[in-house]
Image: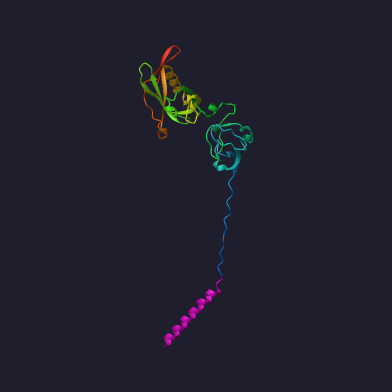
Amino acid sequence: MLRVALLLVALTTGIAAAWLAVRMRPPTVTTVVQAEPAAPPSMQDVLVASAELRPTQVLSSENIRWQPWPESALNPVYITRPGRPDALETLTGSIVRNRMSLGEPIREANLASRHVGFLAAILPTGKRAVAVRISAENTAGGFILPNDRVDVLHTEGQENVSRTILWNIPVLAIDQIVDERSKDEKGKATVIGKTATLELDPQQAEILIAAQAKGTISLSLRSAADNDDHSKRTTPNIRVIRGGRAEVLRTR
């Protein structure tokens, strides 16, 4: 019994000592370190479209504006206020060559001089605009319109055989003339194109002109799903006369 009593006394004394030690311990102080706010990125004013811009549209103070742009995301082709402080005034009147979205930075490559013609403004670098004679019979019944893509067929009068000489050619414009002799049920005149203007490179332009001089040109309307088909094909070559010498233009 004595041993049990001593054990209980020792246990009670230990508990009391532990309780006193906890009570006398100084409170723990938690230090909160606040992170410094990140510095805002450096900005620079960039000339952007303040509205949707379409090809051939004229720039004005109402459809372009300066907009802050992060310097880390600047592209050398962007027009900046430090580099071109007078851009709003000097570019007003320029012609838009490519479609631009709201807020898209303006680039010199997307603009043409105000002194050039409509077609020259939208014609890509290195391309030529060539007109060919057309009728409803050789243009898919007259349903070929600007921005469509066509294959160009050549028919020689003597052989009476048609061959495709150019593929996937963009149509820039259709000359629309009203034929008063043909009217629908409502009395409206039918619109018939007499010429189609195609976008060609210089070699294609030579091929087309030579083929048109030797026979008949027809346009075959392509499906929009085939517009990415740029594979090369071979066809018989076309012979032209240059400086009194016969040369062969290789078609594709």
Residue positioned most to the bottom: 1
Would residue 63 appear left or right of 132 to someone viewing this image?
A: right
Where residue 165 sits in the image (x, y, percent)? 40, 23
Give the image's coloring scheme: rainbow
The quadrant the N terminus occupies is: bottom left
Where residue 40 sits in the image (x, y, percent)? 59, 48
Residue at position x 42%, y 12% from top?
245
* Residue placed most toward the observer, 241 or 55: 55
Would residue 115 appear left or right of 177 to someone viewing this image?
A: right
Where residue 69 sits in the image (x, y, percent)? 58, 42
Where residue 113 sits in the image (x, y, percent)? 58, 28
* Residue placed most toward the observer, 206 or 84: 206
Would residue 242 appear left or right of 31 to someone viewing this image?
A: left
Residue at position x 47%, y 83% from top?
9
Q: Is residue 101 above or below residue 218?
A: below
**Magenta residues (range):** 1-26
In terms of image quadrants, where is residue 6? Answer: bottom left
* Residue placed most toward the observer, 238 or 153: 153
Q: Is residue 144 above or below residue 213?
A: below
Residue 196 appears in the rendering: no
Residue 119 appears in the rendering: yes
Q: Is residue 154 magenta?
A: no
The quadrant the C terminus occupies is: top left
In terms of image quadrants, where is residue 104? Answer: top right
Magenta region, mostly helix, strand or loop? helix
Residue at position x 40%, y 21% from top?
154
Q: Is residue 22 magenta?
A: yes
